[in-house]
Image (cartoon, rainbow, N blue to C red):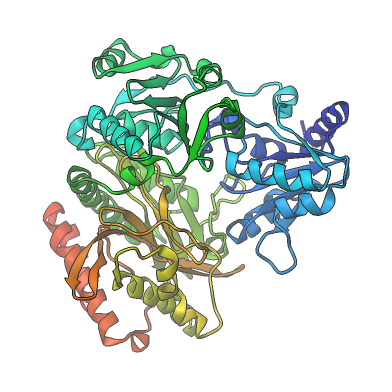
Amino acid sequence: MKITQKIEKLREKMAELGINAYIIPSTDPHISEYVPQRWTSRAWISGFTGSAGTIVITDKVAGLFTDSRYFLQATHELEGSGIELFKVGNTGVEDYPDWIKSNLKSGDVLGFDGMVVQAAFAKGIVADLKQNGVETSFGHDLIEQIWTDRPSIPDNKIFVHELKYAGKSRVEKINDIRTKMKQKNVDTHVVATLDDLCWIFNIRGKDVAFNPVAVCYGVITLQKAQLYIYDSKLTSEVRAELESDGVEICNYDDLLTAVKGFSASSRVYIDPARVNYALYTAIPTECTKIEGMNFSTNMKACKNDIEIQGVKNAMRRDAVAMCEFIHWFENTLGKEKITEVSAGEKLRQIRSEKELFFGESFNTIAGYAGNGAIVHYGATPESDTEIKAEGFFLLDSGGQYLDGTTDITRMFCLSEPTDQMMIDYTLVLKGHINLSLAKYPINTRGSQLDVLARIEMWNRAMNYGHGTGHGVGCFMNVHEGPQNIRMNENPAVLEPGMITSNEPGLYREGQYGIRIENLVLTVPFTETEFGKFLQFVNLTLCPIDTRAIKVSMLTQDERNWFNEYHQLVYDEVSPLLNDELKNWLKEKTKSI
């Protein structure tokens, strides 16, 4: 079925129900960024495969609303679909909630599937539209009615995340949550986000590509810990271990019924940003709702000592893989054909040979020349480009290991760079270094540090459209909250134990993209009469290409950081390499 036919069928269903506009988000019932195939509804109906974006369909307009990370990708993927691209963030372009308010009139009906729309968003738009006389209908999954070969809910077996990697037992985690519940004077806590649940119950799964999570829900009370999951996903050994720790196994499909049956006296703690609207509205009105961020979200983000050590161990193995790949790439380019796809496959093959490797942490972004300017580019058989010994090649990749998650971007300068290329590359490097060097007081938010990575670009009237950093899990989702580093305000503060990416970039459409990314750990710096201060330490261990650096643009402090970082890389990684690679790394990490 063509995209135009899918949209036409959806409009027919909308007309039958009297719905004037219908929202199709990127998420699933667990408000995931990356979703199982069953809930790839937005990609199915539009052809747009980016991880962020929302489709809105009316009787006359079909629109995709997404941000600057995906403008180039969306322009290409929407071609011929009849779907209009709304470039959110550009002057005069409304985001979809405001567009809906502007385009629906009194008496109209907005429809959406409440099972896949975030409660916080739905609450707001339902209230706003009601003031304008617009009704909402959230009980219809219209995609289900037209997607005839829709995949089923994943039925993969889960497995235990061992204590030697987790650092804290599920019993301890549940008790810690109960302590937080008592402090908030609540007796029931509903959790829907998959990474929170897998962290709480020390389980992992294979239900979402690249993210080792399993489809489930959880309800924690002061007396019970219930895991709502299909029985077929449990081996007898996993069930026995969970039940021995007091976890009650319930059927996944029974969650809404259980929530509707909460006692009127229940005080329910729920995170409206991390549950779907159908679940949120299922809580009886007689119950007292207390809203706030999931207790586990911040607990999960602040890694314990065992997790931190595990990530450091994973980083060393990943560093060996990266060194082996870069050495292979440099010695093969020009002798054999290498494409974006084959480069990514080679790196995956090398990583897969490392101890405790589980899989990639996301779909590798291997962008040669102009493809590198597409921030979340994914090479396909149609777009796959041969890499030549000229220009820039951007490689953003990562691995999932049983003891940690990695995410790294490195640039390859493949020929004599132009002055513009060197200036652009060095500006990105300066931004990366300046953020790495940051010292900041406790309770600092990522938005307060973001400017450090951008100021040198801003001084030249240049910028990049994505965030500078995202939280990263421990053998968990490569994108993890609550913290991030970006211009947009986020109340979450950076705390010791948090792992965050540092990845400024610069993109010239049709020419090249530049991004340099390490993962950094927030740790204490010092305490003075002015309070406690924090700093970042680098976790990623891999040489940074020096061939496009305009050394004259670097300050002495920046040069010192660069040379000290390369010395750290050599000291940590060289003992793990053979003599040939050790000599190669010595050359790659020499001082500038």
Of the pair 24 and 137, the residue shown nearer to us = 137
Could you tell me which quadrant the C terminus lies in? Answer: bottom left
Residue 470 position within the rendered picture, expressed as x and y whole percent measured from the top left: 42, 55
Residue most toward the bottom? 552
Residue 529 position within the rendered picture, expressed as x and y whole percent measured from the top left: 19, 76
Residue 133 position within the rendered picture, expressed as x and y whole percent measured from the top left: 84, 43
Query: At x 39% / y 31%, what residue is drawn?
Result: 197
Query: At x 31% / y 86%, what residue is drawn?
Result: 555
Q: Is residue 417 visible?
A: no
Name above or below for residue 452 compared with residue 213. below
Q: Would residue 207 be found to the left or right of residue 57 on screen?
A: left
The quadrant where residue 537 appears: bottom left
Q: Would residue 37 be found to the left or right of residue 247 on screen?
A: right
Name above or below for residue 536 compared with residue 153. below
The quadrant where residue 56 appears: top right
Q: Is residue 143 visible?
A: yes
